[in-house]
């Protein structure tokens, strides 16, 4: 059958668009009755993550769409909105990040998916350890199953080998964001400190009341970072093995995944800010970094080196400190 010329042109356009389109397939989270336990038991902490998602999304959108905007638009106006308003009254529901960062999401949808998939892992581990119905040993085994499930999505999973810090610090675009936006960078590192730090009381508390008190104490430490100039935000990227040593010892694969995730956050911010990466090249360079962090066969460091990174970077106090210590007997 012959196709009319006009329809042929339409089909050619659709085919071209389809060839250039980024796949938007997604994988459902690991099922189980433990899901949403953290939100039900610790709503003040869980809802903060909705505000964190907005903070990451608005940052990427502004950096990509308004490269010539005054530094103050992020470093002062957006920073104050986040620290004085949104974090104080975080959204009750998850943020539709694509609505906050439409241009960035269209640019590198796979990056959005990759971060979302790692954030699902974060939150499901909170849920397991917040479920007071489940024995401790069963929680450990279930988290390892959830990590396996996360890794089954090979297109989106971060490597379980610790990637070299040189990927974040020694590229031609490195440190551009933290130099231009030191306060906002500190806030992002504060987010990452809390995200890994909350595991410590959930794992280390002996009783439910200990875990509840420990989560409250960890949140208090985060708010001291936000509110006190004397305390301030981390001066180095928080390393999970230093901030959350119990969690890292019990689930080293997850700890490494989260360090790789947090490095990738910094790298994308640097790429978007750096004038050494032309605007038209941002997508290509970001996609190259994404591929690098899926690959655990190169540019990695040994486990003992990863465990000792805090000392090499000036100590855990420069990363915000250890998240939680059990009370003295």
Image (cartoon, helix red, strand yellow):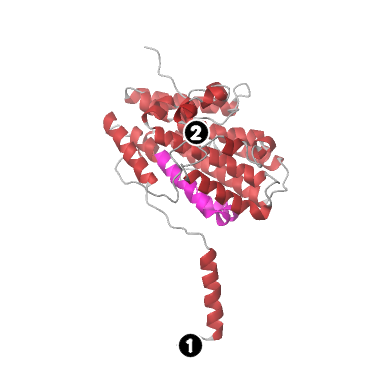
Give the structural element (helix, strand or loop) at label 1: loop
Tag 1: Cα neighbours inside 10 Å, few (<14), some, or many (≥20)? Answer: few
Check residue 87 for magenta coloring.
no
Return the x and y of residue 189 as percentages of the image width and height.
Answer: 56, 33
Return the x and y of residue 246 as percentages of the image width and height.
Answer: 40, 25
Which secondary structure class fits the magenta region best?
Answer: helix
* Corner quadrant of residue 56: top right
* Corner quadrant of residue 256: top left
For image coordinates 73% across by 43% down, the residue present is 70
Label ID, residue 285: none
Chain part drawn in magenta: 95-123
Label ID, residue 301: 2
The quadrant of the image that shows the N terminus is bottom left
Return the x and y of residue 26 as percentages of the image width and height.
Answer: 42, 54
For image coordinates 59% across by 22% down, the residue present is 231
Label 1 belongs to which residue?
A: 2
Q: Is residue 220 visible?
A: yes
For image coordinates 53% across by 53% down, the residue present is 98
């Amino acid at each position: 059958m012959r196709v009319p010329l006009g329809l042929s042109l339409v089909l050619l356009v659709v085919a071209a668009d389809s060839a250039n389109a980024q796949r938007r397939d997604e994988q459902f989270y690991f099922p189980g009755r433990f899901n949403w336990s953290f939100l039900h038991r610790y709503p003040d902490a869980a809802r903060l993550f909705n505000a964190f998602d907005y903070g990451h999304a608005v940052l990427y959108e502004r950096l990509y769409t308004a490269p010539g905007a005054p530094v103050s638009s992020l470093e002062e106006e957006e920073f104050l909105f986040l620290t004085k308003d949104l974090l104080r009254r975080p959204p009750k529901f998850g943020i539709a990040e694509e609505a906050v960062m439409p241009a960035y999401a269209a640019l590198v949808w796979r990056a959005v998916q990759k971060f979302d998939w790692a954030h699902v892992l974060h939150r499901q581990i909170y849920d397991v350890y917040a479920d007071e119905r489940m024995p401790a040993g069963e929680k450990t085994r279930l988290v390892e199953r959830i990590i396996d499930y996360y890794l089954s999505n090979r297109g989106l999973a971060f490597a379980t080998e610790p990637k070299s810090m040189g990927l974040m610090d020694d590229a031609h675009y490195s440190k551009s964001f933290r130099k231009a936006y030191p306060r906002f960078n500190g806030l992002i590192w504060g987010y990452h400190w809390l995200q890994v730090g909350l595991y410590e009381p959930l794992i280390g508390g002996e009783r439910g009341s200990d875990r509840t008190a420990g989560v409250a104490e960890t949140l208090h430490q985060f708010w001291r970072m936000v509110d006190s100039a004397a305390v301030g935000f981390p001066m180095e990227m928080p390393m999970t093995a230093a901030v959350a040593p119990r969690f890292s010892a019990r689930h080293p694969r997850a700890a490494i995944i989260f360090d790789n995730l947090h490095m990738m956050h910094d790298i994308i911010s640097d790429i978007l800010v750096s004038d050494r990466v032309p605007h038209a090249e941002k997508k290509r360079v970001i996609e190259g970094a994404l591929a690098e962090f899926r690959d655990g066969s190169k540019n990695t460091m040994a486990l003992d080196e990863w465990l000792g990174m805090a000392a090499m970077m000036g100590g855990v106090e420069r990363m915000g400190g250890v998240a939680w210590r059990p009370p003295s007997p």
